[in-house]
Amino acid sequence: TNRGVKISTGLYVLRHTKSPAMLIEVGFVDDKDDADLYNKVGVNAICKAITEGILNSSVASTPAQTPTPAPKPASKPAAKPATSNPYRNGSTYTLKADALRVRTGAGTGYRTKAYNELSANAKKNAYGNGNLKKGTRVTCMSTKMIGNDIWMRIPSGWIAVRYSGKTYVG
């Protein structure tokens, strides 16, 4: 059933974009019958219908091109597991990555903090979305290891300092 257009300014993804944006709900997939119908119609037909609705005109269907696979680069040695934590409480470190997210807890399962939730000092070194800029100096208040990943608590929240074999803070 078409429930019509709903206008909302309360959704984070719509409030925090610079371009005009909309969310399109193509269906409720909450049981096997819904999933079967979705798969029967197919993602290409759904995308074509959305495009035609936005443009208010018909668009030609073209079969998807199968890309030629790129040659595989020579394999790199696996990242060395973190066996110890080199970060010390009270020490200051520099962000080696740009747009590093600040979270409410240690791990990707925690919410990313907004700009207005950061400390005054962090705001001076953050983008409008709350992500910290490369080169920002942070003070380690505590750390937490989750598997081979290392998370650091700073005055504004938690940041990933080593995640999936990559180091973001030095």
Image: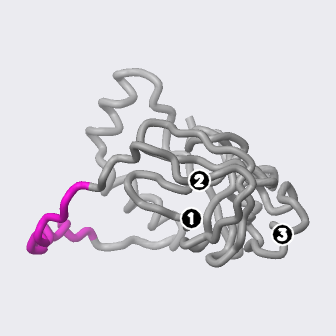
Q: Is residue 55 magenta?
A: no
Give the number of the disc on residue 87: 2
Q: How is the model colour-coded?
A: one colour
Q: Earlier in the sequence, mark 1 or mark 3?
A: 3
State which mark lies toward you, 2 or 3.
2
Of 93 and 17, the residue lying toward us: 93
- Residue sitting at x 45%, y 31%: 29
Direction bottom: furthest residue: 135
Quarter of the image that includes the C terminus: bottom right
* Magenta portion: prevailing SS class: loop
Which residues are the magenta region? Answer: 61-78
Q: Is disc 2 surrounded by few (<14), some (14 to 19) or many (20+) residues within 10 Å? A: many
Of 155 and 116, the residue lying toward us: 155
Kindly state the secondary structure of the residue where label 1 is placed. loop
The residue pinned by badge 3 equals: 123
**What amino acid type should be assigned to the residue bearing mark 1?**
Val
Q: Quadrant of residue 159?
A: bottom right
Q: CA distance from mark 2 to mark 3?
A: 23 Å
**What amino acid type should be assigned to the residue bearing mark 2?**
Tyr
The residue pinned by badge 1 equals: 169
